[in-house]
Every structure is written in structure tokens, then in C-alpha cells.
Image (tube, rainbow, N blue to C red):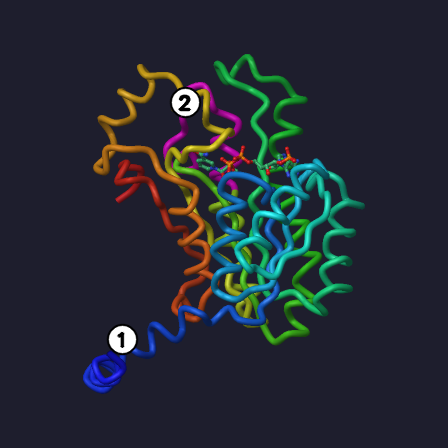
């Protein structure tokens, strides 16, 4: 068997290099927000499986404890803390705890989002807009601003924002949320050139419909799903792991020439050329 592997590496050196670089996150330190469930947890898992030390967080201690135990059971190096991304002191605590435990920061996955409103745009209130834009957009930027100096000390890093297919094609009844996700595409583009000088890449992922608690109002409704399936090339909704892998790829050296970019992972749902 070993002889076959060596022969394969000799005849396909690029394939050999690729499989080695898959574990290129060894020793990297990754903060993932809203990471005790769904896409954030899957991202923490994907980064951890590639050797990163991960810091998970969300608002509830019980959820943090459960996520930490799960990841530890998978031999992932992980610590956790509560962090409501909407609170400045929580964001600072998250960053400080990461520095205290792991000594630096290489990766930020800004994944947290809220959606307190369904309905016609004109029925949305100022409070709705303030909340959605604050948590989904402003806090993503403020957390990035907090971690950048520490990434610079490490000689570079990666920032990933989690947008949505709704950022390209606003979803019915989800107007303010969709607009906040469009703003993340802009934030990615605006930050990338500035942070490239510090060897920090800034990218974004726009998932389609992924089976999580956040989207259960969609996937539990058969009529809505039948309608969505018509738009999907892959006739099923996605799993969180299918987004976690994209995030880990963007943070890896395999994506070393990608910055300012948004990768859509939508099962082929058409949202842009
Ligand atoms: N699911 C989809 O179909 C879909 C599609 C496109 C984009 N997205 C995006 O993917 C991201 C994650 O969504 P998901 O579907 O994975 O959600 P999810 O499975 O419902 O998980 C949400 C996570 O966020 C935490 N959380 C909620 N509010 C928070 C806050 N203010 N601060 C910190 N943590 C918070 C929750 O834990 P606690 O309750 O303990 O705080 C939980 O860990 C969001 O940005 C969402 O917009 C999702």
C-alpha cells in the first residue's frame, strides 16, 4: 500500500502538495462568532479538523458548553465563552480571552446575524433597521477592527463574513435582513484592499438555504420548499458542513490569491452571473 502511495506522489506531485496543504491551518487561531449551532459550529469544526485552535461563542453559556464538549470529543483544540456580538464589552472579552489562551489571532469568521422582522418592507420600523444593521453589519466591522492589530502582529490573517443568497437576490418578506447581507458584500470589497497591505485576506460566503434553526420557518414549510426547489440545481437544501468547508477553504493557503470575493454556495440557485 505504501508503495502505491509513494508512486502516486512521485507521479502526481501537485496532488501530493494539495493533500498536505489541506492541514495548513495547523497552529492557526480562529475566532468564530455565533458558533454553538448551525453554520458557525460547522465552520468551527471544519477549521478545527484542519488543525486550527478554535474559539467558539454565542449568547448562552449552556450552548457554549455543549459546543465545546462536542468539538473536544472530535479531538479539536477548542475553548469557548459567551459573546453577544451586539455588545462591545462581549466582543472585547472574546478577543482578550483568545489572546490570553492562545497568544494571537489568525482567523475571524463573523457569522452572527439576527432577523427580527418578516413582512412588507414598508411595515418595518426604525428599531428593526437599527437592530439588523447593528448586529449583522456594524458589529462585523467592529469585531474586524478589534482583531486586525493582532493579525498584523502575526504577519497576516483571514477575515470571513457570512452573507446570504438574499444579499444578491433579496428574499420575499426578508427585506431589511437581505439588505444587511448585501452590505456585507460591500464591506468585504471595501476592506480587502486596505487589509491586503497587512497580508490579511477578506472574503465572504453567501449560503443558500441551509438546514439550521435560523431557517426552519422556510424548510419546514412544504409549499415554500417546493417553490425553492424549482430554483435549485441540486434538489435539496444544504447542510451546515457544506458551508463550513467553504469557509475553511477560504482561510487556507489554497485560497492564497482570493480576496475581496464572495463565494455563493446555494445548490445552484441562480442569484448572479
Ligand atoms: N440557515 C440558512 O439557511 C442561512 C442562509 C444564508 C445565510 N445564513 C447566515 O448564516 C449565519 C448563521 O446562521 P445559522 O443558520 O447557522 O443559524 P443557527 O443555526 O440558528 O445558529 C445561530 C447561532 O447564533 C448564535 N447567536 C444568535 N444571536 C447571537 C448574537 N447576537 N451574538 C452571538 N451569537 C448569537 C446562537 O446561539 P445563542 O442562542 O446561544 O446565542 C447560535 O449558535 C447567519 O449570519 C445567517 O444570516 C444562514
Which residue is pictured at 24% across the width and 78% down the height? 1
Magenta residue span? 166-183
Q: Residue 184 colored magenta?
A: no
Identity of the residue furthest to the right in this view? 89
Classify residue 140 as left or right of residue 235. right
In this view, the mark in front (2 or 1): 1
Q: Which residue is mark 2?
A: 218
Classify the position of the C terminus by image quarter. top left
Marks 2,1: beta carbons within 8 A: no
Disc nearer the start of the sequence (2/1): 1
| x and y percentages locating residue 77 in the rendered image | 61, 61
Classify residue 171 as left or right of residue 154. left
- Cβ of mark 2 under 8 Å from ligand 1: the answer is yes
Q: Residues within 10 Å of mark 2 (few under 14, many from 20)?
A: some
| x and y percentages locating residue 241 in the rendered image | 42, 47
Name the dominant secondary structure of the magenta segment: helix
> Could you say which quadrant of the image residue 232 lies in?
top left
Helix, strand or loop at mark 2:
helix
**Foreground residue, 130 or 78?**
78
Identity of the residue furthest to the front in this view? 1
C-alpha gap between disc 2 and disc 1? 40 Å
| x and y percentages locating residue 263 in the rendered image | 38, 51
Which residue is pictured at 37% across the width and 32% down the height? 169
Which disc is residue 57 wearing? none
**Foreground residue, 235 or 50?**
50
Q: Residue 175 colored magenta?
A: yes
**Foreground residue, 209 or 13?**
13
Q: Residues within 10 Å of mark 1 (few under 14, many from 20)?
A: few
Q: Which residue is mark 1?
A: 15
Amino acid at each position: 500500500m505504501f508503495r502505491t502511495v509513494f508512486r502516486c506522489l512521485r507521479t502526481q506531485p501537485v496532488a501530493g502538495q494539495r493533500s498536505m496543504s489541506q492541514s495548513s491551518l495547523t497552529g492557526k487561531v480562529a475566532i468564530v462568532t455565533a458558533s454553538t449551532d448551525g453554520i458557525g459550529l460547522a465552520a468551527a469544526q471544519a477549521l478545527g479538523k484542519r488543525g486550527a485552535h478554535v474559539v467558539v461563542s454565542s449568547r448562552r453559556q449552556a450552548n457554549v458548553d455543549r459546543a465545546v464538549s462536542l468539538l473536544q470529543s472530535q479531538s479539536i483544540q477548542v475553548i469557548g465563552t459567551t459573546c453577544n456580538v451586539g455588545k462591545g464589552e462581549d466582543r472585547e472579552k472574546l478577543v482578550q480571552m483568545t489572546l490570553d489562551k492562545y497568544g494571537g489571532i489568525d482567523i475571524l469568521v463573523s457569522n452572527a446575524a439576527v432577523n427580527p422582522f418578516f413582512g412588507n418592507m414598508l411595515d418595518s420600523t426604525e428599531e428593526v433597521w437599527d437592530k439588523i444593521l447593528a448586529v449583522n453589519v456594524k458589529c462585523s466591522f467592529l469585531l474586524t477592527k478589534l482583531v486586525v492589530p493582532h493579525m498584523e502582529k502575526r504577519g497576516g490573517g483571514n477575515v470571513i463574513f457570512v452573507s446570504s443568497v438574499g444579499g444578491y437576490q433579496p428574499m420575499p418578506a426578508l427585506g431589511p435582513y437581505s439588505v444587511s447581507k448585501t452590505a456585507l458584500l460591500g464591506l468585504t470589497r471595501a476592506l480587502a484592499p486596505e487589509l491586503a497591505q497587512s497580508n490579511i485576506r477578506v472574503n465572504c460566503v453567501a449560503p443558500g438555504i441551509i438546514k439550521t434553526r435560523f431557517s426552519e420557518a422556510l424548510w419546514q414549510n412544504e409549499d415554500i420548499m417546493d417553490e425553492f426547489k424549482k430554483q435549485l440545481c441540486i434538489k435539496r437544501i444544504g447542510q451546515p458542513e457544506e458551508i463550513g468547508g467553504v469557509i475553511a477553504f477560504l482561510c487556507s493557503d489554497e485560497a492564497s490569491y482570493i480576496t475581496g470575493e464572495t463565494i455563493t454556495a446555494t445548490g445552484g440557485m441562480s442569484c448572479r452571473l
